[in-house]
Image (cartoon, rainbow, N blue to C red):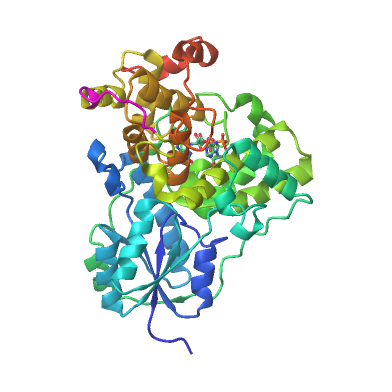
Amino acid sequence: MTPSVPLVYWFRSDLRLRDNPAWVQACALNQQLLAVVFEPHIASTEQRWGCLQPGAHRLAWWHANVRALQLELAQHGVTLLVLRGKAVEVLQTVANKVGAVAIHCEEIAAPYERAEVQALQHAGFEVHPHWGSTLFEEQQLPFAVDELPAVFSQFRNLVERARTPVPVPVPLAAPQHVHGFSIASETAASFAPWAARPPAEQLCMDARSAFIWGGETGSAVRAGNAGAHAYLDAYFSSDRVAQYKATRNGLIGMAYSSKWSPWLAVGAVSAREIWEALRTYEQRQGANDGSYWLWFELLWREYFRWLHKQYGDALYRRRGLSEIARPVVATKHQRTFAHWTQGRTGCELVDAGMRELAESGYSSNRMRQILASYWIYDLSGDWRAGAAWFEANLLDYDVYSNQGNWLYIAGLGTDPRGGRRFNVAKQTADHDADGQYRNLWSASP
Ligand SMILES: Cc1cc2nc3c(=O)[nH]c(=O)nc-3n(C[C@H](O)[C@H](O)[C@H](O)COP(=O)(O)OP(=O)(O)OC[C@H]3O[C@@H](n4cnc5c(N)ncnc54)[C@H](O)[C@@H]3O)c2cc1C
């Protein structure tokens, strides 16, 4: 007999049912479930930079993934409410309305997300955050989290040595028995009156973009867990894995890198599901440089997650983990920031990169490095403002990877070798000698 008091499952950056430990744990309680999700918003601590709203591309991709999840949940009779506003306020209203006292969710080790959980706990709710976005569980790491190596290559070496013999990744199956809590449609509508917002398909079809996804249907690149798996199948059946190492610093088109990050960022696919697909590919075709480098990159993602577990809020200080902060231009900061964000710095490669980011919601790893370096070193900007702009605009925004990479480039993280300054003239010569990229994202296409 299913008890009548429902529990709330709060989807955060884990928009999937498969290989989702928090969801599996909540379903195992055999209680009725009401699922909720909040529209992305900018972490309040970053609002001082004026990046108040997530950009249209980030929102469009997120909505497409939520719609995919909503359809999947509906098959189990579970309603997914898409909510707006401050989690602590809105969740209290919703939970009180349905009589729920327990809230289950993904644990996110970043200050704003942690504060959301604490506020709910202070408001009297039983909140059960559950860690689940890494390849490894904490006890599988070959060191205690507070002894995480300061240098990424040390971390990688320890992990790689420890995974001999390589453990086979076993993503968790999606629970089959889920008890949906039926909520009256007028009650649901009172919480989310905007739910019928039209999809923004036109946003994702820009032929210049390096990540073209065709909306929900009719495209090879689709949102949601099923979309991610269809994409992975196509990816691993092509020669793109073998080409990865040679092409990963490209700037134009879909093929130069894996483009897994959009699904990973919203949690439509887990890193372990991707690892499983990578392992299957290696068993079938044999490992190659590309498959190794993709694993290597997944470890960077992993590293920044454990770094957050170790240092938490300290990673968000202006000085990061360093003793002293970097100097910034205080007087003209706002104007310089406007020039950088609008692609009007006068440096052609950077301006093209900033336009690509704003107009497509995507940017290659190489361009992200160049843009961040230019903001920090050439324009003497506050790295946190740059990180906030990326947060608003990247459709694959991921709190851990964004913060971790900005800190790394600014030289304010754990790496003792200092920051990473990129020489723009050299980068232009190395990666856009013929001007193709700068032409593609020139002011007047
Ligand atoms: C300043 C800056 C900000 C960034 N912000 C984000 C962000 O918000 N979200 C995000 O997902 N990535 C971020 N990255 C990391 C990286 O640029 C992207 O993960 C990558 O470009 C995504 O494209 P891909 O999936 O084709 O990557 P691939 O090159 O194909 O790599 C495969 C996967 O490995 C992981 N990965 C690769 N490089 C990194 C890296 N440097 N750090 C962490 N994980 C990595 C990603 O999950 C990626 O999907 C940032 C990098 C920089 C320099």
Q: Nearer the viewer, residue 156 or 88?
A: 156
Q: Relative to 347, does residue 273 appear above or below in the rendering?
A: below
Question: Where residue 412 sits: x, y (%)?
Answer: 44, 34
Q: Relative to 396, does residue 333 appear above or below in the rendering?
A: above
Q: Identify the residue at horizontal 28%, vertical 57% (top origin).
A: 196
Image-based side of 45 in relation to 114, left or right: left
What's the magenta region?
324-333
Judge whether residue 332 is colored magenta. yes
Q: Relative to 258, does residue 93 appear above or below in the rendering?
A: below
Question: Where residue 248 sits: x, y (%)?
Answer: 59, 28
Q: Identify the residue at horizontal 54%, vertical 32% (top origin).
A: 416
Task: Tell me, yes or no, if residue 211 can be seen here.
Answer: no
Question: Where residue 271 sits: x, y (%)?
Answer: 58, 50
Judge whether residue 200 is colored magenta. no
Q: Nearer the viewer, residue 440 or 48?
A: 48
Q: Identify the residue at horizontal 46%, vertical 10% (top origin).
A: 425
Image quadrant where one finds the C terminus: top left
Question: Where residue 229 sits: x, y (%)?
Answer: 58, 50
Q: Nearer the viewer, residue 376 or 82?
A: 376
Residue 181's quadrant in the figure? bottom left
Image-based side of 134 in relation to 33, left or right: right
| Majority secondary structure in the magenta region | loop
